[in-house]
Image (tube, rainbow, N blue to C red):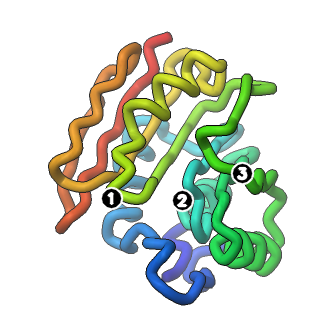
């Protein structure tokens, strides 16, 4: 697993041993960032949050492409160790919150881009997006991406679907927050 583009292009990322963490496949991540780039134009000055961060591949990719900041939220100890090692090896400046996504309270600031890749069996896309939108985690017009299993339908209140794409067992849903 590597950073796909930007200042850290080609740099490897560590992943924890075992199957507790399922990093996004390079192909799926590349497709997501292509969809985002076509809508955003640039990642410059974006405040990004990577939920269920695992190795941090999504947030680190955004930082590599010029995002101003990224907050990573992860609760698994092995994943946190890999995430912190990846941040250190790249010299990235990032905020890591070692907690469950469901325990996040009101946001200190809204984010322009929210990315999440929760465990597929959680089906966490809709409840997480609706809850965090209510708590002020998303700026008006922000984009949110959810990677889930193919059968998962992600249609949260207050969001419009920009596009959906399927890659093997995964489905990417890209939404725009209308709040």
Few, some or many C-alpha atoms within 10 Å of disc 3 (few <14, some 14-19, many ≥20)?
Answer: some
Q: Secondary structure at mark 3?
A: loop
* Side of 172 relative to 73 (left or right): left
Q: Give the residue at x 71% y 69%.
A: 80
Q: Point out the tag, 1 or 2, that comes first from the N-terminus.
A: 1
Left or right of 161? Residue 43 is right
Distance between mark 2 and mark 3 Cα atoms: 18 Å
Q: Which residue occupies the foreground of this view, 62 or 40?
A: 62
Please provide percent x and percent y for residue 14.
Answer: 62, 84
Determine which quarter of the picture holds residue 112: top right
Q: Residue at x 31, y 52 (%)?
A: 148
Q: Which residue is mark 3?
A: 99
Tell me residue 137's x, y (percent).
64, 26
| 87 vs 83, nearest the viewer | 83
Is residue 17 shown left or right of residue 91?
left
Dot placed on the residue nearer the N-terminal end, 3 or 1 = 1
For the residues bearing labels 2 and 3, Cβ distance under 8 angstroms: no
- Give the numbered dot on residue 177: none
Which residue is at the front of the view, 28 or 135?
135
- Residue 143 placed where, x, y %? 47, 32
* Mark 1 secondary-structure assignment: helix
Q: Which residue is mark 2?
A: 58
Establish if 151 lies above or below 10. Answer: above
Residue drawn at x 57%, y 16% as measured from the top left? 134
Q: Which mark is residue 31?
A: 1
On screen, 34 above or below 9? above
Vertical relation: 136 (above or below) 97: above
Give me the C-alpha separation between circle 1 and circle 2: 12 Å
Per the model, the C-alpha gap separating discs 3 and 1 is 28 Å
């Amino acid at each position: 697993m590597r950073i796909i583009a930007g200042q850290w292009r080609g740099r490897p990322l560590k992943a924890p041993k075992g199957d507790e963490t399922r990093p996004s496949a390079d192909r799926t991540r590349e497709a997501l960032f292509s969809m985002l780039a076509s809508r955003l134009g640039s990642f410059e000055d974006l405040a990004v949050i990577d939920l269920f961060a695992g190795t941090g591949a999504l947030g680190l990719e955004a930082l590599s492409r010029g995002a101003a900041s990224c907050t990573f939220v992860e609760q698994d100890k092995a994943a946190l160790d890999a995430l912190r090692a990846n941040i250190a090896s790249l010299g990235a400046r990032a905020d890591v919150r070692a907690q469950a996504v469901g325990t996040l309270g009101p946001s200190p600031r809204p984010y322009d881009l929210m990315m999440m890749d929760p465990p597929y069996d959680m089906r966490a896309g809709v409840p997480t997006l609706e809850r965090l939108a209510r708590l002020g985690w998303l700026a008006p017009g922000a984009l949110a991406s959810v990677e889930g299993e193919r059968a998962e339908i992600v249609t949260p209140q207050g969001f419009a679907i920009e596009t959906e794409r399927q890659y093997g067992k995964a489905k990417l849903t890209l939404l725009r927050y209308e709040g």
